[in-house]
Amino acid sequence: MAQEPGTTDATRSGAPAPDPASASDPASDPASAPEELSDLRVLKALAQPRRQRMLQHLTVHGPATSATLARALGLNTGATSYHLRELARYGFVEETSGPGASGPGHGGRERWWRAVPGDRRFPPRSRQSPEVRLVMDELDHLSYAADLELFEQLRQESGATELGEWADAFPYSRGTIRLTLPELHAFFEEYIALLNRYKRSDADTPADARTVLTRLLAFPAPTAPAPSTDAPSRDNREETETS
């Protein structure tokens, strides 16, 4: 699994890291080099449900204070402050400038936090210990549920006038391709590189831009079940027409 650049959503993949030989490839920038998260303590810290909700809010809505997160998520500020410190401890969030502030953490009395972007990846399932697999399964469950909730929320809002032309601009695709395992790895890395092409700083982002959530799910089709040998097929059965 690998995290999509520019977000804090870790992405699963057994693909090898991209070749950094090409300096023209944005994905070869050391700042966006893949980082594997394999430490069980780090994974447990990330998989905590409240922290997942807080990271989602920071990713979707931008920097916030512990009080802002508490109001938005129905928590108390003591809980959000604690979870922010734990997320910062493992590098998932960091202090940033508040509105009108001159430097990180100096937005008046309030401490502002932002999600730290990066290409974070989990070890492939074949290298995960039983303990790591349990944590990863929980993280998967939280991630999928959150994505479906966000998508359904947008569907309900898509008829609202404030979305305007954005309501007609949701890319959606279901596809089927035949690939070898190395080709699937390459496909994934090309997807990450495509995201990197569109990544830019806040200063370079147009005023009419919106945060767009991207999700890629690619998996081998289930193996077709073997024909049952308990009973003959319909084509081989004698059929009698009733008169």
Image (cartoon, rainbow, N blue to C red):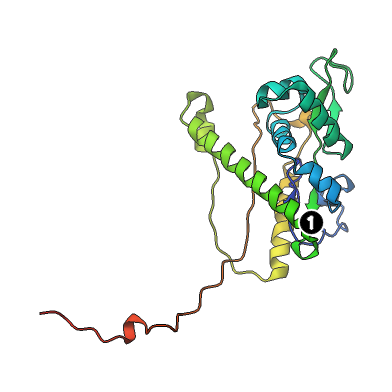
Q: Quadrant of the N terminus?
A: bottom right
How many marks the image carries: the answer is: 1
**174 relative position to 132: left or right:** left
Residue found at the far top of this picture:
108
Residue 31 spot, x, y in % from top left: 87, 44
Q: Quadrant of the C terminus?
A: bottom left
Which residue is depicted at the point 80% across and 58% down?
Answer: 123
| 157 in relation to 236, above or below | above
Asked which quadrant contains residue 188, the reply is bottom right
Which residue is depicted at the point 84% across and 25% down?
Answer: 96
The residue identified by callout 1 is: 131
Q: Which one is in front, 114 or 204? A: 114
Which residue is depicted at the point 80% across and 32% down?
Answer: 83
Q: Amino acid at mark 1?
A: Glu
**Residue 24 visible in the displayed image:** no
Asked which quadrant contains residue 115, the reply is top right
Residue 204 spot, x, y in % from top left: 76, 31
User: Dot 1: within a 10 Å radius of its alpha carbon, few (fewer than 14), some, or many (20 or more) residues?
Assistant: few
| 62 in relation to 187, above or below | above
Residue 49 spot, x, y in % from top left: 71, 39
Label 1, secondary structure: give it: helix
Q: Which one is in front, 83 or 217? A: 83
| 80 in relation to 197, above or below | above
Q: Which one is in front, 90 or 192? A: 90
Residue 235 spot, x, y in % from top left: 32, 83
**Residue 196 visible in the displayed image:** yes
